[in-house]
Image (cartoon, rainbow, N blue to C red):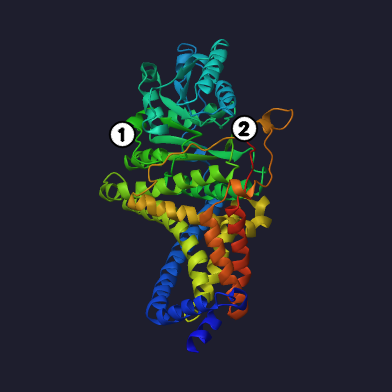
Amino acid sequence: MEIESTSSRFIPEGFEGTANDIAAQFGFIFHMLKAPLFIPILNIMVFLCLAMSLMLFIERLYMGIVIVLVKIFGKKIDKRYKYQPIRDDVELGSSAYPMVLIQIPMFNEKEVYQLSIGAACGLSWPADRIIIQVLDDSTDPAIKDLVELECKRWQSKGINIIYEIRDNRLGYKSGALKEGMKRSYVKHCDYVAIFDADFQPEPDYLWRTIPFLHHNPEIALVQARWTFVNADECLMTRMQEMSLDYHFTVEQEVGSSTYAFFGFNGTAGVWRISAIEEAGGWNGRTTVEDMDLAVRAGLKGFKFLYIGDLHVKSELPSTFKAYRFQQHRWSCGPANLFRKMVMEIVRNKKVTLWKKFYVIYSFFFVRKIIAHIVTFVFYCIVIPGTVLVPEVHIPMWGLVYIPSIITILNAVGTPRSVHLLVFWILFENVMSLHRSKACFIGLFETGRVNEWVVTDKLGDVTKATKPGPKATKKPQFSKIGESLHLTELGVGAFLFFVACYDYSYGKNNYWVYLYFQAVAFFVMGFGYAGTFVPNS
């Protein structure tokens, strides 16, 4: 009788039936283990999650205060650093302008190769003081032929563009960039601008960035902001825009204004070549070669400058598969780099103690590790767990107040999408499953730690630059059998079960959130997210 009563309290009526005996056994086992095992473990997890939430809250609040002060009292960048346009010299002629290398790394970029090459060739700078280097790692011979033909077409117009290939893909993007820097003609270059294959710099990009490097030898990197031509493609791209806009509007701005340090975004930035060499060059030991170089250059004492009003168009991944791969790389790589460099940062003697603390604690630990782990563990494990173990209590300040403030602070970067905050929360919680898993992979160097999958581009940028019929792809539900994601479906099933239990027997009304979050996991688990591209 005790077994049956326990199971009836634990299992809602909707889950009882022919398997009532099995449910009763599970209920009995759960009841026996609850006090000695589940309650202590869950109490520890609640404590750790609240501590991590406080760390994230303080970090977000701090950056919010700093960005407000910077906007109100901060000096403009042309006042903080010497800025003077580079002008013609009667005696020196065009040699008064520094030599600039443009690198465009590519890998099977059939949809966007013309776009990036055309934008680079359209940059305004003295023709004899710029070299455009297309680094093509494509494995498809047909695509390689197309890219080479496009380079020759621009060469025939008098553009100094060089098509470079190599016989391997060692180091992936970092390997291509490193190999490109070995060319003899690069020795004559002072700066290198890097643009991924879907990025379109405006013609005045070099005029607005190079003077800062030219007149301020302590600056190693000038980074521009990304804007997204396909942000309105689907709900998933709108969610990405909100996250990335916060990164650029707040994180990059705060790092540039207060510490003259931030992580290089891998593209849409200009480097001082001598700074790259002094920092040790490109290194393929992690999947975030851009961040790796930035940290090493920062430890050499170089400064970084972010220009928030200089925009470079790019494309967001609009398929769920591409976005998952991208987020794995962006989450695993920083965690792995943190593991490899934390002691090197601690022992460094060229930067201040405060800057080292900022890089280790704020830049790496809170933003790249804590933010991902606490999101998934707290909202998808701990909160549902307290429904099944009501003896464990979560204080209201940690459950509602702090998360609400963090969410509002994250929304400041994209005011036009404030009405989508609820969807953004649910979407981020789903993605935190993959990000937290990637963090652990990076920290412990297991499994897919060095996996590099190039983010697929669909050529959405053509809609913003060329009139004509839309591409053949169209947003629609994919067929259920083609894109099932079992991990999301499993978490969704767990949350749905807990929601049903809470609705029937709970006292905290968590079921409202749990049902919505379960639906979000189901939607993405069945592949109903992003743009569906029919096979052609």
Is residue 324 or residue 483 the one in the foreground? 483
Q: Is residue 233 above or below residue 143?
A: below
Q: Kindly give the residue lying farthest to the right in the view shown.
A: 468
Q: The C terminus lies in which quarter of the figure?
A: top right
Question: Looking at the image, is mark 2 or mark 1 earlier in the sequence?
Answer: 1
Residue at screen point 36% across, 33% down: 282
Of helix, strand and loop, which one carries label 1?
Answer: loop
In the image, taking residue 439 as reference, residue 520 lies left or right, namely right
From the top left corner, tell me how far across and down residue 196 is, in percent: 51, 32
Is residue 54 or residue 464 the one in the foreground? 464
Is residue 55 or residue 377 the one in the foreground? 377
Q: Which mark is residue 459?
A: 2
Which kind of residue does numbered mark 2 sit on?
Answer: Gly
Circle 2 crowding by C-alpha within 10 Å: few under 14, some 14–19, many from 20: some
In the image, taking residue 263 as reference, residue 461 lies left or right, namely right
Whether residue 309 is visible to the viewer of this picture, yes or no, is no
Residue at screen point 58% across, 29% down: 112
Q: Is residue 374 above or below residue 121?
A: below
Which kind of residue does numbered mark 1 sit on?
Answer: Gly
Of helix, strand and loop, which one carries label 2?
Answer: loop
Residue at screen point 35% across, 54% down: 357
**Residues at badges 2 and 1 in contact (C-beta under 8 Å)?**
no
From the top left corner, tell me how far across and down residue 43 is, in percent: 42, 75
Circle 1 crowding by C-alpha within 10 Å: few under 14, some 14–19, many from 20: few
From the top left corner, tell me how far across and down residue 32 is, in percent: 41, 82
From the top left corner, tell me how far across and down residue 34 is, in percent: 42, 79
Is residue 356 or residue 397 the one in the foreground? 397
Give the Cα separation between the discs numbered 2 and 1.
35 Å
Numbered label tally: 2
Q: Kindly give the residue lying farthest to the bottom in the view shown.
A: 1
User: Disc 1 marks which residue?
Assistant: 280
Q: Nearer the viewer, mark 2 or mark 1?
A: 2
